[in-house]
Structures are given as C-alpha cells and as structure tokens.
Amino acid sequence: MTQLAEAEGPGLDCHRTGTPVSCTDLAAVGVRWPRFAAAARAAGYLSVHSVPLLLRGEALGAMDLFGAAAGGLSADTAELAHALAAISAVGLARWRTIIEREVVIGQLQTALDSRVLIEQAKGVLAERSHTSVDAAFAALRGHARRTGRKLAEVAASVVRDGLDIAVPSEPARR
C-alpha cells in the first residue's frame, strides 16, 4: 500500500522494531499512521497485523495481514502468520545470497575481461614498439593516467581501435 511512499505504517514499525504490530481498528489509529490508515480504510480494510520476517534475530522485512473486519487474529491464524513469516525470511535471505553472488560473478567477469584486454594491449604495444612488455605496460598505464581514462578503456582502444601510444625505446626481452 502506501507505507513506503508515506514512510509510515505498521509494516514499517514492525520491520524497524522486529516485533509484531497489530492494529485491530484502523479507524482508531489516525494519529499514529494517518495517511496509511486513511488509504487502508479507503481500500476496504479495517484491521492490519504485521509480523516480522526474522532470521537469526535480524528483521529482514515484515509481512502485513489486512482484514476486512475490525478485530485481532485468532491464535491459529497468528501461528500460521508467524510460520509463513519464518519461511518467507529464509526465502528472502536465500534470494539476497543469490543476488549478491550474481553481482560478485559479474564483477569478477568484468575484471577478468579487463585483464585479458590489458594483456593483449601490452602485447600489441610491445610488438609495435619492439620493446618489452613491461615498458609497454608502463606506457599504457601512463597514457591512462594522463588522459584520465580507465586502463581497460585505453587497452580496448589500443586493441580494437588501433590507438598508438608512444613507448620509450628499450630492447625487447624475450
């Protein structure tokens, strides 16, 4: 609903505190969450109960249960809500782990691709200048610094676009 947009509501309070929050009558909470309560009532809800998504004591979020009638949750419904919240917390944590791994894999792939490109550029410059790979790398790095470009970007220009960078003369080591 409007909890995130309005920065108020039982779900946000539940997430912040890590404890359940129940509102058995949304008509009576106008002062605590005025915008949320008005929006929930306009949508036809008269009660809301928030259960924290806890994993190892950390609140990962909250699950809101909206009721069309005023009143609390039965013991069975409350137990089911806590069980669903626990399962959801595990699923959410698993999803976060997958996303984090995908980010790391992407970063590692980018680093590997950059490294390959840099090695190719070093070889191209060393061959063109008849000098060592170390001297070619120093020239490549120096050009990147002087021009304010990333090393991999300059390397790509050397390999793909034929950028010629002056490499100080030095006998090639083979």
Image (cartoon, rainbow, N blue to C red):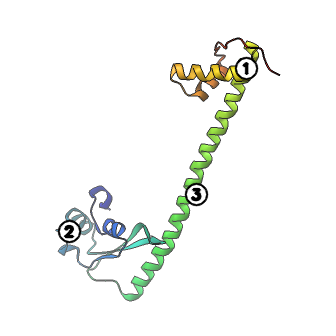
- Of tags 2 and 1, which is closer to the observer? 1
**Residue 163: image x %, image y %?**
63, 16
Labels 2 and 1: the sequence-earlier one: 2
Task: Give me the residue at 76% from left, 17% from top.
Answer: 127
**Residue 170: image x %, image y %?**
73, 14
Q: Quadrant of the C terminus?
A: top right
Asked whether the residues under the numbered discs 1 and 3 touch, taking CB atoms below 8 Å apart as contact, a structural biologist would say: no
Residue type, numbered disc 2: Arg
Residue type, numbered disc 3: Ile
Element marked by disc 1: helix
Q: Quadrant of the N terminus?
A: bottom left
Residue type, numbered disc 1: Val
Is residue 159 visible in the rendered image? The answer is no
Return the residue at label 1.
Answer: 124
- How far separated are the C-alphas under marks 2 and 1? 68 Å
Return the residue at label 2.
Answer: 32
| Disc on res. 98 | 3
Labels 2 and 3: the sequence-earlier one: 2
